[in-house]
Image (cartoon, rainbow, N blue to C red):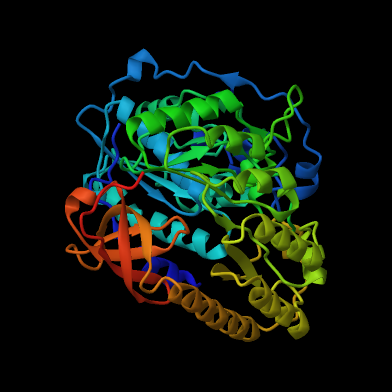
Amino acid sequence: MNEQQRVDQAQVKQVGKKFVKQEDNINRIKNTSSEEMIAKYFQTSYEPQAPDIKKARKRRKEDIQFHYDFAIPEDIEKIGKGKKFLIRTYGCQMNEHDTEVMAGILIEMGYEFTADTNEADIILLNTCAIRENAENKVFGEIGHLKPLKLEKPDLIIGVCGCMSQEESVVDRILKKHQHIDLIFGTHNIHRLPQLLKEALFGKEMIVEVWSKEGDIIENLPKARKGKIKAWVNIMYGCDKFCTYCIVPMTRGKERSRKPEDIIQEVRHLAAQGYQEVTLLGQNVNAYGKDFEDISYGLGDLMDDINKIDIPRVRFTTSHPRDFDDYLIEVLAKGGNLLDHIHLPVQSGSSEVLKKMNRKYTREEYLNLVKKIRKAIPNVTLTTDIIVGFPNETEEQFEETMTLMEEVGFEAAYTYIYSPREGTPAARKVDDVPEEVKKQRLHRLNALVNKQSAESMKKYKDKVVKVLVEGESKKNPDVLAGYTEKNKLVNFRGPKSSIGKIVEVEITEAKTWSLDGIIVENMVEVK
């Protein structure tokens, strides 16, 4: 599945999907060099190749504090009254969830959401650092916003998210994009009110990026999108240090929320009528491994959530190395624990996996798949695959193709390897021509498309349960939603079924979606 196919798959236009309810900064940026600012606010000496992965590997397991006392300072509590904000989000579900938190904070400050750039008094770019293409999009948007800033000098433009944690990115903004007012990182989102106040009244560029991990702030407001599906963050950070990945440097070490806080949040969502929750983590099934006082992992958490009256529970994204037997045992219980598992493999070659520092072999991955299929016979598996890792041979790529077929993945997110500054893989000399990488991606996508189309055929003339999310983007007269196995279904039916789980008979199977008709005498499926 390539970028365009992912766009095509996301055909749901959700009805009513809109937002609902240290250190001091420098005083005079113009008298301070960008190098001095970087050194101060990243709490490290400035290095052009930073972040330094060696230093990141040696990070200390400092105690994480839990806070339940977040509040908007009284002097700025309604500072946004009569004003509007816009947040553009790039990247993963974690960024989407961070956007919900920032939107919640801004709404509590009196701001209202707008989708119109020209109406906004605050524009925040919540960025992604996973691939070069994502960074290019952000810098393109930064450039496009400059004329608007010249036209509206009081407009506040901020850059946050994972790109903000990269020293080279911040240095580039400081030197070349001085119309940016605010830069902050992934660990200090809860400081948005204070940072915004400084940006509004100081009229200086505000930079606050913590290289140390943040604490866990439990009572942050969230402006969730809609009332149907919800993200629930269960942990932060990643300790895996895959050689191609910048996330451990931008998101920090693994730190888990307390089980009781997560369970309380899920119960609250169930009481509000949400139909589905997705548990989030950069490496979600490492949940609880950092606990020192209790033995409690993702399997335990899923077992407890299995008892909550909410129809659907998913989790993403998992790492094969942490997918233990107890988690499989719990998932096999079914109920509201869905039998769709996203299990990134990245490569089918043990040699490439070793170079990626994935800490498992092809054989170990296949054995894990066998365990899962034995316990959950009807499981649907999807994955992530990187093509063109430095010096990947044709034989190693073919191993990925045969693994794709052997596992029978029903979908895959596929990418050409993108070097990220500061990672070990980016320092490798690569002898694979770009054209060869593109050809391999094309061949892989052809196989992904074939397997997806084959998997869809089995639904023809079958009745499936669909969580109706809204109107199809392509046709407002058609409703769209997803099955338990995360298959997109388009069908005609009453708008009153939006937000409910209904039965739909499939009449046509396509490569990435299903068409159907709602079952007569439709009743909500519990």
As rendered, which of 348 and 176 lies closer to the eye? 348
Q: How many marks?
A: 0
As rendered, which of 81 and 261 lies closer to the eye? 261
As drawn, the residue found furthest toward the front would be: 521
Residue 500 % position (x, y): 29, 47
As drawn, the residue found furthest toward the top would be: 74
As rendered, which of 158 and 241 lies closer to the eye? 241
The image quadrant where one finds the C terminus is top left
- Residue at point 38% right, 74% down? 460
For residue 180, what is the image quadrant?
A: top left
- Residue at point 41% right, 35% down? 102
Q: Is residue 119 above or below residue 192?
A: below
- Residue at point 63% right, 68% down? 385
For residue 216, what is the image quadrant?
A: top right
Determine whether, in the image, residue 150 is placed left or right of residue 431.
left
Residue 429 % position (x, y): 77, 73
Residue 263 % position (x, y): 52, 28
Determine whether, in the image, residue 175 is placed left or right of residue 385.
left
For the question of whether residue 442 can be seen, the reply is: yes
Determine whether, in the image, residue 263 is placed left or right of residue 81.
right
Q: Is residue 52 above or below residue 37?
A: below
Q: Is residue 508 above or below residue 22?
A: below
